[in-house]
């Protein structure tokens, strides 16, 4: 695990400081004056001057870095810019370069997993899509551990298999829903999860969750289990509200209508039809909570 701050300190700052020290020396400042302005030692300035510091070519060639170095050099050398202002100007550029830009690219090299998230984001942003996605995946993983360790869960898996899903806060489609690739199956009495959770891999349970949200539900997670009257009774005993929907109608519209009729519903079920297996869907705030509800049936 490598933090973006490490990339800034280890890969960006040596090049940036050397460029600024070089600019100030070219304006006639002594090594001592440069050291005082930059808050570094004279020996560090000497290393910069003699090329004893490894410099990153992509930083050296970035026009924004070049322009900032020139502005800071002119301002600091003339006394028109304070050290504080220079620091703020540099920090502003660093934050800019961290957001889907030069530093973000350098960070992706050090942490290849970040490359999976396209777009303009900052790892420092509390509301970033990366953070929301990773939290959803972590929640599904916690929920799966609960289900896998719940004695008897395999008996609740319907013939079509189960899935446990959680969506992003502003989910617009299946690609915004994390779930199990394939389905959780009962293999010789044991719940078997085929792979680690991913986004966009659950179609049916994800559609039910999204349709419920479209109908007014605040739920962000769902899990499906087999239907029978004892399951519904067990869920209502936990204080949940169960609402039926028509499996013969189009699923999205049927689920949405069922939730619109009772927005407090946290259990949706259908009792089957021609070629349609009856199934129960438990809705919850997150995947781990949905799994806890299912464990409460055992």
Image (cartoon, helix red, strand yellow):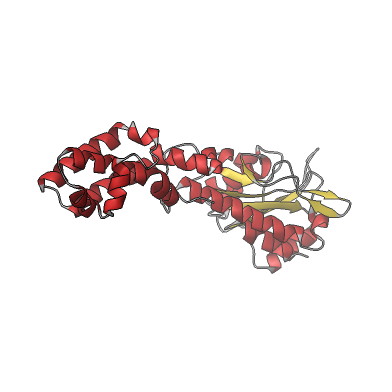
Residue 204: name its quadrant.
top right
- Residue 145 located left or right of residue 84: right
Residue drawn at 68 percent across, 63 percent down: 292
Q: Position of residue 48 (x, y in %)?
A: 31, 43
Residue 26: name its quadrant.
top left
Q: Position of residue 46 (x, y in %)?
A: 29, 46
Residue drawn at 33 percent across, 34 percent down: 60
Asked whether residue 105 appears in the rendered view, the answer is yes
Q: Position of residue 206 (x, y in %)?
A: 63, 44
Closer to the camera in the image, 296 or 74: 74
Q: Residue furthest right?
A: 188
- The number of discs equals 0
Closer to the camera in the image, 113 or 175: 113
**Quadrant in the picture for the C terminus:** bottom right
Image position of 203 with respect to 41: above or below:
above
Asked whether residue 169 appears in the rendered view, the answer is no
Q: Position of residue 296 (x, y in %)?
A: 72, 66
Residue drawn at 57 percent across, 38 percent down: 175
Closer to the camera in the image, 197 or 2: 2
- Residue 249 located left or right of residue 153: left
């Amino acid at each position: 695990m490598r933090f973006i701050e490490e990339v800034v300190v280890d890969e960006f700052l040596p090049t940036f400081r050397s460029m600024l020290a070089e600019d100030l020396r070219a304006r006639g400042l002594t090594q001592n004056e440069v050291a005082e302005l930059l808050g570094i030692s004279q020996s560090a300035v000497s290393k910069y001057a003699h090329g004893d510091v490894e410099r990153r070519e992509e930083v050296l060639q970035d026009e924004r870095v070049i322009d900032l170095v020139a502005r800071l050099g002119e301002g600091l050398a003339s006394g028109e810019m304070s050290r504080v202002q220079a620091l703020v100007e540099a920090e502003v550029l660093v934050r800019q370069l961290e957001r889907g830009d030069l530093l973000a690219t350098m960070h992706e090299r050090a942490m290849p997993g970040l490359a999976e998230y396209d777009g303009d984001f900052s790892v420092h942003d509390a509301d970033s899509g990366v953070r929301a996605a990773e939290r959803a995946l972590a929640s599904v993983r916690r929920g799966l551990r609960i289900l896998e360790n719940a004695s008897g869960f395999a008996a609740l898996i319907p013939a079509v298999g189960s899935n446990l899903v959680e969506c992003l806060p502003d989910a617009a489609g299946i690609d915004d829903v994390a779930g199990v690739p394939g389905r959780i199956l009962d293999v010789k009495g044991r719940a078997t999860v085929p792979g680690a959770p991913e986004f966009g891999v659950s179609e049916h349970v994800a559609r039910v969750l999204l349709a419920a949200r479209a109908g007014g539900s605040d739920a962000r997670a769902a899990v499906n289990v087999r239907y029978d009257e004892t399951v519904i009774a067990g869920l209502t005993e936990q204080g949940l509200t169960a609402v039926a929907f028509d499996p013969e109608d189009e699923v999205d519209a049927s689920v949405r209508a069922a939730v619109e009729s009772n927005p407090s519903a946290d259990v949706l079920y259908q009792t089957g039809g021609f070629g349609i297996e009856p199934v129960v869907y438990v809705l919850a705030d997150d995947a781990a909570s949905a799994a806890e509800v299912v464990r409460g049936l055992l």
